[in-house]
């Protein structure tokens, strides 16, 4: 069975600090997708990134970067120079393609508070 | 495209009442799913569908019913509401092939329905 662990329940940082959100996953499949979603206080789910299991390249998008390491089954998310607008709950999720239905297994989320 | 729409946005039910949460997508996606979000639990899969006429159970299906008579719609029915079903419900749709037959994979979520059962 697949599982996603986000060990950090809540994190507080001061604005402009860098912060890394951890995500560790378990799966038996060799083909899978990993996601990060942001849920701001307004409640909607905002897609941030999708990474497939064959692409271990790290990715950077503005202040956001992701570090995917299959050897440690981790897909960590770093926000550089954090801003108050980054305050949200962040979810890491895993989808096993083999099931053919692309169901997502979510971690429990990390609540990030950026203090001005 | 409107994307994934959900109605209602908010709903209050009394224990034992039944209701249907509506979900629709206009992107011709094959796959649709229902998740519930509870504090500290992340999102958990209730039911999913891989196409019209085909549905299956997820992690937490008890107390819920689904059907998929069209590609566009995937309603979630609460048969007899219980306080334990107080939650935020998200509908999602996804596909795996784009118009040129290339493999893609996107998950689109609706805005959510906040349900309270008293």
Image (cartoon, coloured by chain):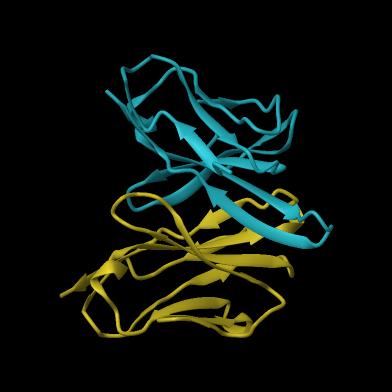
Chain colours: A yellow, B cyan
Q: Examine the image and state in which quarter residue A22 appears.
A: bottom left
The tally of labels here is: 0
Q: Nearer the viewer, residue A87 or A96?
A: A87
The residue lying at 49 percent from left, 43 percent from top is B110
The residue lying at 68 percent from left, 73 percent from top is A53
Q: Is residue A53 above or below residue B115?
A: below
In the displayed structure image, the side of residue B99 where residue B67 appears, left or right: left
**Quarter holding the C terminus of chain B?**
top left
- Residue A85 coordinates in the image, percent (x, y): 28, 68
Q: Residue furthest left?
A: A116
Q: Is residue B4 above or below residue A70?
A: above
Regarding residue A13, the answer to whether it shows in the image is yes
- Residue B30 coordinates in the image, percent (x, y): 72, 42
Q: Nearer the viewer, residue A66 or B102?
A: B102
- Residue B8 coordinates in the image, percent (x, y): 41, 28
The residue lying at 58 percent from left, 44 percent from top is B1
Q: Is residue A92 above or below residue A104?
A: below
Q: Residue furthest right?
A: B101
In the displayed structure image, the side of residue A78 where residue A105 appears, left or right: right
Q: Residue furthest top?
A: B17
In the displayed structure image, the side of residue A74 where residue B54 appears, left or right: right
Q: Nearer the viewer, residue A36 or B56?
A: A36
- Residue B95 coordinates in the image, percent (x, y): 70, 50
Q: Nearer the viewer, residue A43 or B60?
A: A43
Q: Is residue B106 above or below residue B87?
A: below
The residue lying at 74 percent from left, 70 percent from top is A30
């Amino acid at each position: 069975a697949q599982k996603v662990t986000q060990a950090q329940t809540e994190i507080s940082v001061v604005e402009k600090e860098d912060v890394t959100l951890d995500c560790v996953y378990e799966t038996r499949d060799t083909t899978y997708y990993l996601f990060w979603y942001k849920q701001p206080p307004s409640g909607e789910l905002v897609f941030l990134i999708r990474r497939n299991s064959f692409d271990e390249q790290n990715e950077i998008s503005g202040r956001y970067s992701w570090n995917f390491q299959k050897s440690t089954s981790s897909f960590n998310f770093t926000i550089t120079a954090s801003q108050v607008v980054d305050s949200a709950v962040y979810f890491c999720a895993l989808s096993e393609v083999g099931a053919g239905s692309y169901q997502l297994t979510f971690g429990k989320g990390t609540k990030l508070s950026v203090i001005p | 495209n409107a994307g994934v729409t959900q109605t209602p946005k908010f709903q209050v039910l009394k224990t034992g009442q039944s209701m249907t949460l509506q979900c629709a997508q206009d992107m011709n996606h094959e796959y649709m799913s229902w998740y519930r979000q509870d504090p500290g639990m992340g999102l958990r899969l209730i039911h999913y569908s891989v196409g019209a006429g085909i549905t299956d159970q997820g992690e937490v299906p008890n107390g819920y019913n689904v059907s998929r008579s069209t590609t566009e719609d995937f309603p979630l029915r609460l048969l007899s509401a219980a306080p334990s079903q107080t939650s935020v419900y998200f509908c999602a749709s996804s596909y795996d092939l784009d118009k040129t037959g290339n493999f893609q994979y996107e998950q689109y979520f609706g805005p959510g329905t906040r349900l309270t059962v008293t």
